[in-house]
Amino acid sequence: MKCLMPWLIAASLAGCGETALLSVNEGSGPTPSLPAPVKTLIPTVNIAPAVGWPKGNKPTAAPGTQVEAFASGLDHPRWLYLLPNGDVLVAETNAPPKPEDGKGIRGWAMGKAMKRAGATVPSANRITLLRDADHDGVAEIRSPFIEGLNSPFGMTLVGKDLYVADTDRLLRFHYEPGAMQVTDKGHPVTELPGGPLNHHWTKNVIASPDGKKLYVTVGSNSNVGENGMEKEQGRAAIWEVDPANGKHRLFATGLRNPNGLAWEPHSNALWTAVNERDEIGSDLVPDYITSVKDGGFYGWPYSYYGQHVDHRVHPQAPQKVAQALAPDYAVGPHTASLGLAFVKPGMLPPPFEQGALVGQHGSWNRKPHSGYKVLFVPFDRAGKPAGHPIDLLTGFLDSDGKAMGRPVGVINDGKGGILVADDVGNVIWRVSKAP
């Protein structure tokens, strides 16, 4: 079948498009290779069909580490949070209804593509509590913690206030230490951009070290502003929210789709993991992790990776491009890097002792595939990336290029391990030192 077919057919069959000329490693690090954009009649579409894990199979852990299932049989687990007593919260969630995002040929085609990738299952709208009471690395206790939410994602605890980022608002719940379930109905803190378009729906939240401020990620409502910038108000940004009154300001902007948030332990800087734009070739644009400067503008949609102009955007904004900050570290083009956590000392063996973990959900707009792994980025004691990325957890694709799993959220479990949410395998994996 020729690649001149309409895009809607091409997207559903995943049969056409250009191929990467560079390796993923060449699109990684502090100074990634950024070739010229590739213009094609149709975007590259290369979906890894979601098939789940065959019985007895699991990902491949790096030398010196091992991986086992911490919990299985979950319903699209996406994000994780560790409570002070060691209980683990998991957001079992997926996209909310967003009818405006599925309109037209492009929307129809993207819907077909996401279904093939296992990304269209109904949202359980639930946070579940997992408890490993006997400390054997497996959660033997499971309890519905909060139900009836609206595509929940991020979670953070300040004292006895548990904050949950639904897709359209930030909520506060009362939490008693050790509780297996929250019966509080939840109190709105502030509304978040949602609505019938709501292209990038995931909202994450993290508290400042002193608990006085909350930081919330809000992704863009498009790839590169094609729905009109009026639909992007408050989006492609990290919000700073005052939990006492719900007032917010834009802490950083121009971040196409920020998800992971974490405080770097040496510099105390806020870091985020960001999904960059699609449809200008398999080698562009690298996703990245970066420290976030208060008031910083990171380019979207007018430029990428600093001041590289995206000529698809109209009208252009050269004055904005001149302000665009380059991110700190690229983690490969189209890797869909979502999860972000800094390794706590003593958790993992060399070379994984000090640095950032990145959960890479995996590509749809690149040939060959990229991501589908948990990546480790070494950091120095000044709080800066220092070296080449290293694979920690791989093997999520089978020999036919089908997705047995897709990593999302990553956290330290406080008990000598790293937990990884796998929303296709419906598993939470635990990575630890090998005996």
Image: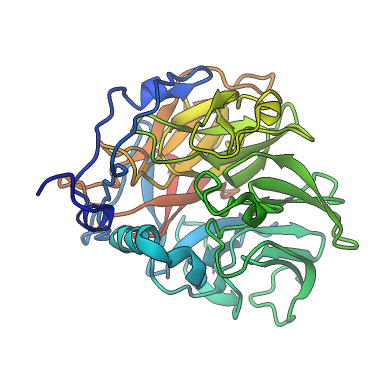
Residue that extends furthest to the front in the rendered view of this protein: 315
- Could you tell whether 230 is left or right of 102 in the image? right
Q: Is residue 219 positioned above or below 352 on the image?
A: below
State the image coordinates of residue 267 (x, y, percent, origin top left): 74, 27
What coloring was used for the rendering?
Answer: rainbow
Residue drawn 32% across and 59% down?
109
Tell me the quarter of the picture where residue 368 sits: top left
Residue that extends furthest to the left in the rendered view of this protein: 1
Residue nearest the observer in this picture, 329 or 412: 329
Residue drawn 29% across and 44% down?
42
State the image coordinates of residue 331 (x, y, percent, origin top left): 47, 31
Residue nearest the observer in this picture, 301 or 92: 301
Residue nearest the observer in this picture, 7 or 118: 7
- Could you tell whether 406 is left or right of 268 in the image? left
Q: Is residue 120 visible?
A: yes
Residue drawn 53% across and 62% down?
132
- Could you tell whether 265 is left or right of 360 in the image? right
Q: Is residue 371 positioned above or below 152 on the image?
A: above
Residue drawn 24% across and 60% down?
51
State the image coordinates of residue 162 (x, y, percent, origin top left): 74, 65
Q: Can residue 119 be seen in this view?
A: no
The quadrant of the image that shows the C terminus is top left
Q: Is residue 319 positioned above or below 171 on the image?
A: above
Residue that extends furthest to the right in the rendered view of this protein: 245
State the image coordinates of residue 10 (x, y, percent, origin top left): 22, 52
How many marks do you count on the picture?
Answer: 0
